[in-house]
Image: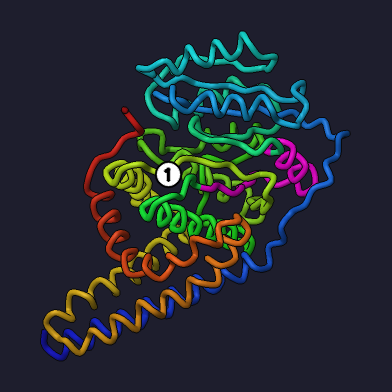
Amino acid sequence: MNFELLQILLNIILITTVLYIICIIAFTVGLYNLKERFFTFNKKINVKVSVLIAARNEGKNIYKLLQSLYYQTFSKELFEVIIIDDHSEDDTKNIIENFIKEKDINIRVFEAENIGKKLAISQALHLANNELIMVTDADCELENTWIESVVNFYYEKKPKMILSPVLLSPANNFFEKIQVLEHLSLIGSTAGSAAIGFPVMCNGANMAYEREAALEVEKQRHDFNIPSGDDMFLLEQFVRNYGYNKVKFLLSKTAIVKTNTCKTVSEFFHQRRRWVSKTKFYTNWKIISTALTVFFFNLSIVSLFVSAFFIPALWSLYLLLTLLKFFIDFPLLKNITTFMNQSKILVWALPLEFIYPFYVIFTAVSGLLINVSWKRN
């Protein structure tokens, strides 16, 4: 590598590093200023809720979700559950129907008219009757106060869209622990960005929005042919229609949704590639610029690692940049792991920093080049 190319590389690294520092500091400040919510539940609130769920081959998980819906503290007279079975090949639908027979809860289950999670959620939305829509995934487990917390927050703040925390579980081995930690960094960034009026991420396992607003937004969406992104494209359109300040993050332990860590490496990368595949279709400049900043900063670290084999003096710069990333990321990770009662896994933050850039580049490139679809297991 000649001197001019090296100079260009170092200048690019400097620019991306500064942008990354600004981005993460902004999210961290937002997260630290976001107050955790402790509710005294108002039993007089009579907001009615429709919980929407798309399910495919979730026979192993769906009963756990149904139970957590049954044990909600929110009045069963004020919420309905609509499940769209997306052509399951296992006993998902039978488990749901048997649960309905056994329990006194308003659950309706329908066969999907089309294929894919996004269209299943859309179908459920048009079947819903109530003012506030809440969405989760079929493999999730909910806090018993989940609905009540979101309803109280909605009643108080009147946002058009509410984002809430998602925790991966379990975290028994190294592979699971780094999944949980990486995902918590995303949740922390989601919360922090929303807190500064800059929402750039969300998670479809724990979202809520006004039904009428969602129906209006759907008329303007053009992403239903894209397999992934039922959450992010909806966020983009809500922001476009109603503004950034109408999207709020509910930081409350009473609103946490738990979902499963991936059991295998192939399952993990398939999921992450599915998440990445939608990024090339984003139109919101804040979301695009954030994604590009994170990508190019991690690419800078990987580039230094590769270049150091040819210019050994760059090993110290590679190590310095990796450690810098750790110190930039740590305050945000510290805050969100403490909130989620996951402080023990914070010891894996430094090892993760040496893995994360390579993982980001691999999933980004493969996710953009390889066609993906919603689970077909």
Place of residue 327 in the rendered image (x, y in percent of width and height, measured from the top left): 47, 77
Q: How is the image coloured?
A: rainbow
Q: Is residue 280 magenta?
A: no
Question: Relative to 285, is 46 above or below?
Answer: above
Q: Nearer the viewer, residue 91 or 314?
A: 91
Q: Quadrant of residue 43?
A: top right
Split into 4 quadrants, where in the image is the N terminus? bottom left
Give coordinates of residue 41: x percent, y percent.
83, 41
> Does residue 1 appear left or right of residue 296 in this picture?
left
Which amino acid does the dot numbered 1 rest on? Thr
The secondary element bearing badge 1 is classed as loop
Q: In which quadrant is the C terminus drawn?
A: top left
Q: Is residue 36 left or right of residue 207?
A: right
Q: Which residues are magenta?
A: 146-167
How far across and how far down the image is residue 34, in percent?
A: 68, 62
Residue hosting label 1: 261
